[in-house]
C-alpha cells in the first residue's frame, strides 16, 4: 500500500526555524514534492527532491533520504504569511499526497 | 496563475443530481490529475490521465468518472450526488516522469456544495 505520514499541526514564532517531517512507504518512488497550500486555495510548488541530500531555495530547504523513506522541509526566518498547510507528495506512478501539516506562525 | 483552468469555480446542487467539472491543463502538459479535498482534509487522489488514456486510479467512487479529450482537456463527472461529496475538487497537470520537469501545477479548484 501507500502510506505518507506528516504531523497534523505545528506552531512556531515569527523569525524562528521550523522543520516539518514526512515519512513514506510507497510501492515505487520517482521523487518527493513539497507543496504549500493556504486555506481554500490551490497548492503551490515549493521543492522537488529526487536524489538524497539537501536542496536549498531561499528561506526554504528540503531534505531527502531514500533509504530511510524520510524527508523534511525546513523553513527559516518564519514570517506570518508562512502560516499554511505544507503537503508532502510522493511521485510513484501517480502523485500521492500526505494529509498535510498545518503550520501556524505567531508574532 | 498556474496556467491550469478549472470551471466552474463554485457549484451548488441537490442530492441525487449529476455535475461535470472541467479542467484545461497547461499548454504542453499531457498528464491531468484529479483530487478531492474535503473540509480540513488532505488531497485525495482520484484519477490520472495521460494523453487521453487512463494512467492511474485512486479511491474514486463508482459514481464518479472522468475522461481526457483529444485536445487534452479533462472532465470529471459526479453522479447520484450525496452530501458527503461536498468538497474542493482540484485538477493538476504535468509532463509525466522521464520527460523533463514533473512538477504538477494546480488549478484553483471547483468548490462543490451538495444540499
Image (cartoon, coloured by chain):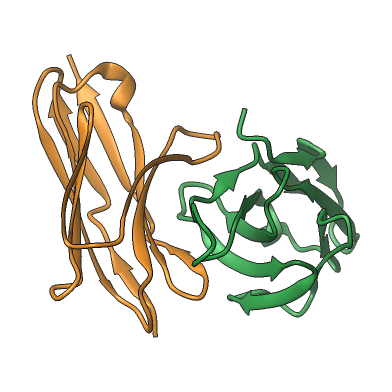
Chain colours: A orange, B green
Q: How many numbered discs, if any?
A: 0
What residue occupies the far top of the structure in this picture? Answer: A107
In the image, residue B54 lies at what x, y percent? 72, 76
Q: Write the residue at 63% across / 68% down.
A: B46
| Quadrant of the rendering where the N terminus of chain B is positioned | top right
Residue B103 visible here:
yes
In the image, residue A102 lies at what x, y percent? 31, 41
What residue occupies the far front of the structure in this picture? Answer: B99
Q: Is residue B71 above or below residue A86?
A: below
Nearer-the-camera pick, B90 or A93 = A93
Q: Write the residue at 72% across / 47% down.
A: B25
Report the side of A62 relative to B111 (left or right): left
Q: Is residue A24 above or below residue A57?
A: below
Q: Quadrant of residue B67?
A: bottom right
Q: Is residue B7 above or below residue B43?
A: above
Q: Write the residue at 77% across / 36% down.
A: B10
Nearer-the-camera pick, B11 or A33 = A33
In the image, residue A100 lies at what x, y percent? 35, 51
Q: Write the residue at 54% across / 62% down.
A: B99
Q: Is residue B101 above or below residue A69?
A: above
Residue B115 visible here:
no
In the image, residue A38 lies at what x, y percent? 45, 32
Report the side of A52 relative to A100 (left or right): left
Amino acid at each position: 500500500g501507500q502510506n505518507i505520514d506528516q504531523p497534523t499541526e505545528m506552531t512556531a514564532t515569527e523569525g524562528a526555524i521550523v522543520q516539518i517531517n514526512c515519512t513514506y512507504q510507497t510501492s515505487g518512488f520517482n521523487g518527493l514534492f513539497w507543496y504549500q497550500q493556504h486555506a481554500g486555495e490551490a497548492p503551490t510548488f515549493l521543492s522537488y527532491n529526487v536524489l538524497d541530500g539537501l536542496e536549498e531555495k531561499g528561506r526554504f530547504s528540503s531534505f531527502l533520504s531514500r533509504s530511510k523513506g524520510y524527508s523534511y522541509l525546513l523553513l527559516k526566518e518564519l514570517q506570518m504569511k508562512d502560516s499554511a498547510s505544507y503537503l508532502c507528495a510522493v511521485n510513484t506512478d501517480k502523485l500521492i499526497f500526505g494529509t498535510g501539516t498545518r503550520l501556524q506562525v505567531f508574532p | 496563475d498556474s496556467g491550469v483552468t478549472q470551471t466552474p469555480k463554485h457549484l451548488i446542487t441537490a442530492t441525487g443530481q449529476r455535475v461535470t467539472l472541467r479542467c484545461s491543463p497547461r499548454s504542453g502538459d499531457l498528464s491531468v490529475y484529479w483530487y478531492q479535498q474535503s473540509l480540513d482534509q488532505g488531497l485525495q487522489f482520484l484519477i490520472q490521465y495521460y494523453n487521453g488514456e487512463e494512467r492511474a486510479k485512486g479511491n474514486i467512487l463508482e459514481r464518479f468518472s472522468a475522461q481526457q479529450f483529444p485536445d487534452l482537456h479533462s472532465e470529471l463527472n459526479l453522479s447520484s450526488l450525496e452530501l458527503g461529496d461536498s468538497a474542493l475538487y482540484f485538477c493538476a497537470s504535468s509532463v509525466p516522469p522521464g520527460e523533463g520537469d514533473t512538477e504538477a501545477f494546480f488549478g484553483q479548484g471547483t468548490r462543490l456544495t451538495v444540499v
